[in-house]
Every structure is written in structure tokens, then in C-alpha cells.
Image: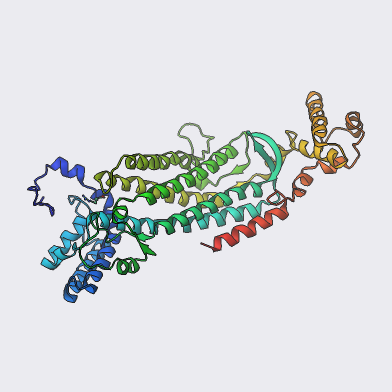
Amino acid sequence: MEKMWAGRTDGNTSKIADDFNSSIKFDKRLFEEDIKGSMAHAMMLSVKNIISKEEEEKLLSGLESILNDIKSGELIIDENAEDIHMFVEKVLTERIGETGKKLHTARSRNDQVALDLKMYTRSEIETIISKLKDFVTVISSKADQYKKSIMPGYTHLQRAQPVTFGHHLMTYAMMFLRDISRLNDCRNRLNVSPIGSCALAGTTYDTDRYFEAEKLGFDSVTLNSIDGVSDRDYCVELLADLSLLMVHLSRLSEEIILWSSWEFKFVELSDAFTTGSSIMPQKKNSDMAELVRGKSGRVIGDLVGTLTMLKGLPLAYNKDMQEDKESLFDALDTVKMSLDVYIPMLNSMIALEDNMINAAKGGFINATDLADYLVKKGMPFRTAYKVSGSIVSYCIKNGKTLDTLSLDEYKQFDELFENDLYDAISLETCVSKRISVGGTSAASFDKQLEFVKTELMKF
Ligand code: ARG
């Protein structure tokens, strides 16, 4: 195939080198950004009298027809082309003749690809933020539904203190809210236009980089041309944000998998989001959650791969950087798919509240409140902690719980115990009295919900 860059060499590369070098199989998804970027470039060239108005119009209508034809399926992207930039330029010249060859004045594929990728990334971030907003809304309304349902809270996966299922779920709303804010930061930081940096050194033409930036929705332009073409920080930053988002999803998945097991039986997933086994008729597996947990690994891999690809690169552009795309696209696709399955899965998940409260009744999760009871009657906390610990140990030996121990037995440990202790250590009290900011009480929950709602309105 004839090379647009033939000249210095005859361009007769071997087929195997062409295939190896070509990125079109994966960068073809940038066609819209590439064409829109080229349109802004043609306008700028004409505004600055580098090309004539008639040439601009020819370029614009040619580019517009290519965009429409790719969208309608009339023009199939040729996978033998080197990349999407070369493909568009070639078709343009076929369609409008010699004028097509003027488009690449005062730019290079190096700033072109940087521009396309930033535009693509920016719109993908916006899509993911909007999915995340839906997700946080689903999580917080599910949490609201269960704001009074008591379950054991865990540390070290050992029953620790009673919390509400609503409070527990709300933790995830907070995590995903931070993900939204991080992605939004990334979007704002990347929104600086590289076009006009050209190959690496800028250009001798009297261009207007601000004009192009404004046309394409950028806030400003990069102020160092070498940085303009060699910066892939935004890819790394986005991959890090996406990795963390997947880690959050993975932690939630792990909990859903545990909660769905016979050992816990805290939740029931809808049949629409579970699978059966080919041999064991009783199985209802949480495959979606398991897959999301598994896929978090590949997104982290995409981040590590990109960091490693960049770490030894001298300035400015090197072909290694073509490798930025597959990792980035893979991570974006994985996150979008994971959120698409997660939102309805969580929305249709049901809590088995009786099992939760029964689990909360075992495991002495009100022992802290027993110690606090003594503290409120004047005993120093360390002493109260010891007394309560011995009572728990006594209960375990005698097959009793803190609620079934008689007052006489309590009094053998300390005279401070009175009849009001039973109310002080009831699970309902343990939860409703935790009114500290961010605590598990319903009053605190309402404040959390209000916070989440106002935060969501900011994005
Ligand atoms: N396909 C290339 C990439 O994705 C475009 C830039 C090519 N630049 C160059 N100097 N060969 O990175």
C-alpha cells in the first residue's frame, strides 16, 4: 500500500511490518474526534489566511461527508490503513482532490493524536460520571429503604458492633461520590488543547491555537509544544481513577458474594443477575459480582501497563505511545460494562432482614455498649472494658448472651449494674444512640443522605 509518508524511503514496508505498525483496528473508534478536530483545524487555517475560504469550504464539506458516511455505515473504515488519521486524510483527498492535501498544514499526527485522545477521553469521562451518578442514586435509595435494618458490622470479618444495613450501604455511596469527583478533576485537568504543538517544536505558520481550542471546547492550550505531544499524564490519571473505582466495585462485589452465601444469607439477588450450575441443581451463583471483582484486575493491569510503557520514554513522541490506546479503551469499556450490570443488579437486590438481625444477636456485638453503660455510671473506660470482657467470657462458658444474663449474675461482676442495663445494651439502643456525626443512627443517616443528594447536584 502506498504510504503518505513515502519520500525519504520508498515506503515499501513489508506486510508484516504494516500489520504490526497499524493501529487502525483500535483507533478507528476515534473517527469522530479526528474529523471534528480536522474541521476546526481547517477553519483556523482559513481564518489565518493560510488557506482560502473556498479551500476551507471544500475541506469542511469533504470532512462532513466522511463523518456522515462512517456513521451511516456507507463508508467502512479500511483496516489496512496505518491509523484513523491517515485513513480520513486519504479518503478526503480521494473525495475533494488536491485541496485535501492542504489539511495537514501546520499540524502533525503527533499533536493530532494527542488532541483526538483528549477529546475522546473527555467525553468518556462524562459518560462514566453520568453512570456513576445513577449508581449513587440507586445505592442511596436502597440504603434509605434499609436505614433501620440492623445487621452486625464487622472488623477482621468478625462481628464487631451493630450497624444498619442502610449505613453500611451508604459507605459505598461515599466511595463512588469520591470517584465522581476524582474523574471530574481529571476531566478538568486534561481539558487543555495540544493541537498546534505540531511534531514537537511548534510551527513557523501564523496559527491561532486558541481559536481551535475554543472551537473544540477546551479551556486553554498547552504552553510547551514538547509537553503538548508527549504528555499522557491524563491517561495514567484516568486509569488510576478507574482502577480505584473498580477496586470499590470489587469490594462491594466481595460483600455481595459473601452475603449471598448460605453462611450469611443477608441478601438475595434477583434471578436476572445470577446464574445456575450445569451440574448442581441447587446453585444460584453471583457471577456478575464475581466477574466485576475479576475484571478489577485487568483495569489495574491497564494502569500498570501504561505506566511501564511511559517510564523510559525520552521526549517527545515515540511510537511506544501508540500502546496507550488499547489499555485506556479496555479500562473504559470494562468500567462502563461493569456499571451497566451493577446498577440494575443492586437496584433489584433484597435484604433478608430477619437473618441480619439474628446474626446481630449472636457474637456479643453489644459488648462495647455494656462497657459504655458502666462508664456512664462513673467507671473508667479501661476498667469497664475489663469487666465487660469477663462477662462475655462467663457467657461463652455458660452458653448465655448479654441479654439473657440475670441481674444477679451481672451484680456478681459489679454492683453498678441495675435493671436499666438491658435497655442500654439492646441492639436498637446501640444503633439509635450512635448519634455522633457519621454514626449509624437514623438521624445521622438522614444527614448522610442529604449530603449525597447535594453532592450529586454539583456534577
Ligand atoms: N497511530 C499513532 C499513535 O497512535 C499516531 C501518531 C503517529 N505519529 C508518528 N510520528 N508516527 O500514536
Q: At 45% from the left edge and 41% from the top edge, which residue is drawn?
A: 296
Q: Quadrant of residue 126?
A: bottom left
Position of residue 265 relative to residue 238, above or below, is above
The residue lying toward the viewer, choosing from 136 and 89, is 89
Q: Position of residue 425 (x, y in %)?
A: 81, 41
Is any atom of residue 232 visible in this view? Answer: yes
Work out whether residue 165 or residue 57 is closer to the camera in this orientation and state it: 57
283 up-or-down from 107: above or below: above
Q: Nearer the viewer, residue 256 or 182?
A: 182
- Which residue lies most toward the left here? 10
Q: Residue furthest bottom?
A: 53
In this image, 239 relative to 110: left or right?
Answer: right
Relative to residue 267, is residue 205 depicted above or below? below
Let me know if residue 29 appears in the view: no
Residue 259 location, quadrant: top right
Percent position of residue 373, x then y: 84, 40
Q: What is the total number of numbered labels drawn onto the structure image? A: 0
Q: Residue 411 vs residue 87: left or right?
A: right
Which residue sits at x=61%, y=53%? 142
Residue 248: % across, % down = 52, 45
Percent across and percent down for residue 155 are 65, 36
